[in-house]
Image (cartoon, grey):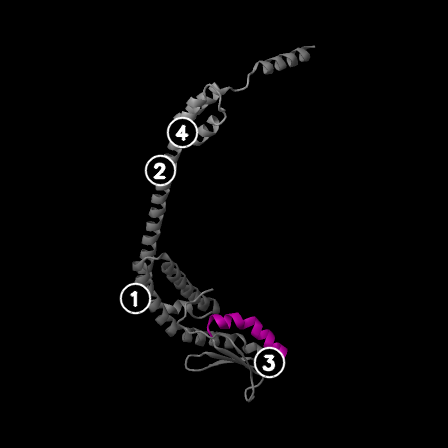
């Protein structure tokens, strides 16, 4: 019985609650305008229909909220533009500082000895060249004349270094690989003044499948070091060899991974 009485009271209380009227909407809209929430104020005022005694006041208030919302949007646009400009300028300064730093480091002289002795170390030098290429690419996309001039200076310096370093990288790579493959009775040596051709000689390469499998395994690394051609013989005095073309660009080309 007690629960039934409570249910009746709840139903009666709910029945006593009235739906919001136009005056409620008007007051709610005024509160929202005071909070500069013009968007929701406009939505609330639209609930007051034409023909309502408060429609004219609501319509006037709607026009005010609409104009203030437009002002608000314009202010937000200006603020966002200033933020974007500030971010762009900060990025510009950061890029200029980075370009100047890289140019200064090159002018001071890079210790390339740290990139010798192992294949992993050689690859780190390639990563360094790749980082230069990334900086230069970002600079050229910036659209700033001053930055583009710095990028051109850096690219010129990097290109010269690459022309000097890639033959040394290939020579060192061949030396390391020759030691690694010694136990497999494979000899590795290079041809050309810039060490652009790499040669593999060993009984392992009597079978064409072994040549193909080995080339597939090593092709990307040979391309990274910019060997132009790889050749395979199964014994030293073999007049014929199987070859693959590897890299067709120049050592001065940007390094992109």
Of 201 and 145, which appears nearest the observer? 145
Q: Nearer the viewer, mark 2 or mark 4?
A: 4
Callouts 2 and 3 close, C-beta under 8 Å: no
In percent of width and height, residue 57 lies at 42, 22
Q: Does 137 appear above or below 172? A: above
Looking at marks 1 and 3 on the same chain, the residue that comes earlier in the sequence is marked by 1
Assess disc 4: are there few (<14), some (14-19) or many (≥20) residues with their C-alpha within 10 Å of its C-alpha.
Answer: few
Asked if residue 239 lies left or right of residue 116, the reply is right
Callouts 4 and 3 close, C-beta under 8 Å: no
Determine which residue is flagged by label 4: 63
Query: Residue farthest to the right?
Result: 1
SS at mark 3? Answer: helix
Q: CA distance from mark 1 to mark 3?
A: 46 Å
Looking at marks 2 and 4 on the same chain, the residue that comes earlier in the sequence is marked by 4
Q: Nearer the viewer, mark 2 or mark 3?
A: 2
| Magenta-colored span | 208-226
Of 185 and 231, which appears nearest the observer? 231
Determine which residue is flagged by label 3: 205
Assess disc 2: are there few (<14), some (14-19) or many (≥20) residues with their C-alpha within 10 Å of its C-alpha.
Answer: few
Name the residue at 39% across, 37% down: 73
Q: CA distance from mark 2 to mark 4?
A: 18 Å
Determine which residue is flagged by label 1: 107
Quadrant of the image for the N terminus?
A: top right
Looking at marks 4 and 3 on the same chain, the residue that comes earlier in the sequence is marked by 4
Looking at marks 2 and 3 on the same chain, the residue that comes earlier in the sequence is marked by 2
Q: Main secondary structure of the magenta part?
A: helix
Determine which residue is flagged by label 2: 75
Looking at marks 1 and 4 on the same chain, the residue that comes earlier in the sequence is marked by 4
In percent of width and height, residue 47 lies at 50, 26
Of 146 and 31, which appears nearest the observer? 31
SS at mark 2? Answer: helix
Q: CA distance from mark 2 to mark 3?
A: 73 Å
């Amino acid at each position: 019985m007690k629960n039934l009485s409570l249910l009746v009271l709840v139903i009666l209380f709910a029945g006593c609650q009235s739906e919001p009227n136009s005056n409620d909407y008007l007051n709610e809209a005024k509160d929202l305008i005071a909070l500069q929430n013009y968007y929701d104020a406009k939505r609330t005022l639209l609930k007051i229909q034409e023909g309502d005694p408060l429609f004219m006041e609501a319509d006037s208030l709607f026009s005010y909220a609409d104009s203030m919302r437009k002002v608000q949007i314009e202010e937000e646009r200006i603020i966002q533009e200033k933020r974007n400009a500030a971010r762009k300028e900060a990025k510009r300064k950061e890029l200029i500082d980075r370009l100047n730093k890289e140019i200064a480091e090159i002018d001071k002289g890079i210790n390339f000895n740290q990139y010798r002795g192992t294949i992993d170390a050689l690859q780190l030098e390639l990563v360094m060249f790749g980082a230069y290429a990334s900086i230069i690419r970002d600079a050229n996309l910036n659209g700033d004349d001053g930055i583009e001039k710095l990028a051109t200076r850096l690219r010129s310096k990097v290109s010269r270094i690459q022309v000097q370093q890639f033959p040394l990288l290939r020579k060192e790579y061949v030396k390391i690989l020759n030691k690694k493959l010694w136990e497999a009775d494979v000899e590795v040596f290079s041809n050309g003044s810039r060490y652009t051709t790499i040669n593999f000689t060993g009984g392992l390469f009597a079978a064409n499948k072994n040549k193909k499998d080995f080339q597939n395994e090593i092709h990307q690394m040979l391309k990274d070091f910019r060997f132009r051609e790889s050749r395979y013989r199964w014994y030293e005095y073999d007049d014929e060899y199987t070859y693959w073309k590897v890299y067709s660009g120049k050592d001065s080309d940007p390094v992109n991974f």
